[in-house]
Amino acid sequence: MWIYLLTVSYSYFSVIVCMKSVEKIIREHCSEEALQDLIRYYTKLEWWEEVYFLEDVSNHCERWIERKIREDKYGSNDIHIFSHQHPENKFSFVDSSLLKTKYTYEIALDWIEHLREINGIVHYIDDDFTTLLSCRKHFYMKELLPLIDTNKYNSWSITEAWVKANVFNWDTNKREMVEHEVLRLTHDNGTQMTFTLPHDRKEYIHCLFFVMPEDQQKGYFNTKKYFQNLWELLAIECGQLGIESICLGKPLDAPPVKGNEWRFTELEKDQHEVRATKLLRYWQRMGGVLPCLEDSQDCHPDRLYFATPEQALKVKEQIDDKTFSHLYKYLRHSIYGSELEAHLLS
């Protein structure tokens, strides 16, 4: 009786899922505009494998399903043309339509997960930023704006832009192009940080870019001075967990650097790193960790996290020495000050 019920329920599930083609599943979870934007983005980055996959994603998925069905029915090797069974295969008796349902369902889950894992892509130019207008009532802005008027931070001015963004919409379970608000703090000397507003009161502030004009690039300690000032303002003073940002890995779209290019010289990487560059080590020296081990959906392994002092201590407690090397081992004259830095290094 139990086997019969299982067979009936699975057959019903098969009918429901198979009503949707792979093409329909792909389009249900990624708009055509967002898909084409991803292809342009990866072409610009010269990530050709991703471009190849996305340009014909439905076809690639269909072929994968067909291959998996053949392997399940006849085995991955020595397929017998005149036999419906393979001596090493346990699924040769299963109907192909059920196997197709199984692998179509897997494709749907993998496709959604893939779209979720792609970082948000924001398109803007400097001319998009205008006087702050629309977000003054946001809970974060109610804390930030009064601070900018104080003596400690009054050298910074704030502007906003509404820009096109390629993001995963968790409400619709779909990758979409949306209008997105972006803010920028600009110092009197031209130093800038472009960032987005937090959704909750305990988040890392997402920094899109931190840029210093070439005439202000006067060494590590000068950079630290302005970055630390922004970190204190945006994270500590406003009660957030810290600042996080993707570390540039290629010179593409990178702001100009004074003197010879040094940022993207590759170094020996730790076991948990995808790659290591001089720029990455520069920011790790200042206080960034990669990856953040805090149990949060906002933590991504390809981003640097500059936690507040309180949060940095929590991150240190979560380090698993069996999996990761010491995340704070590169600290030298960091934003944390000598006492806390010594503790984080211990």
Image (tube, rainbow, N blue to C red):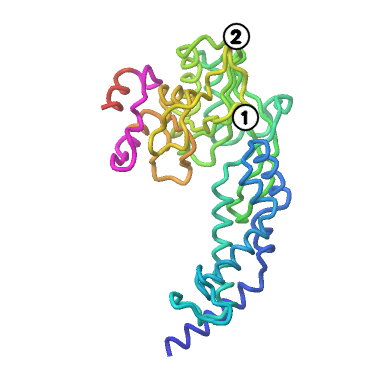
- Kind of element beneath mark 1: strand
Instruction: Report whether 201 appears left or right of 258.
Output: left
- Kind of element beneath mark 2: helix
Residue 258 visible in the picture = yes
Q: Disc 1 vs disc 2: which is toward the camera? A: 2
As for residue 326 lying within the magenta part, the answer is yes
Magenta stretch bounds: 314-337
The mark found on residue 215 in the picture is 2
Identify the image quadrant of residue 166.
Answer: top right
Crowd class of label 1 (few under 14; some 14 to 19; many from 20; radius 10 Å): many
Specify the farthest residue to the bottom: 1
Q: Position of residue 55 (x, y in %)?
A: 70, 51
Q: How many numbered circles does the render carry?
A: 2
Residue at the image point whose x is 54% and y is 54% from the top: 113
Q: Looking at numbered disc 1 in the image, what kind of residue is underneath it?
A: Leu
Identify the image quadrant of residue 287.
Answer: top left
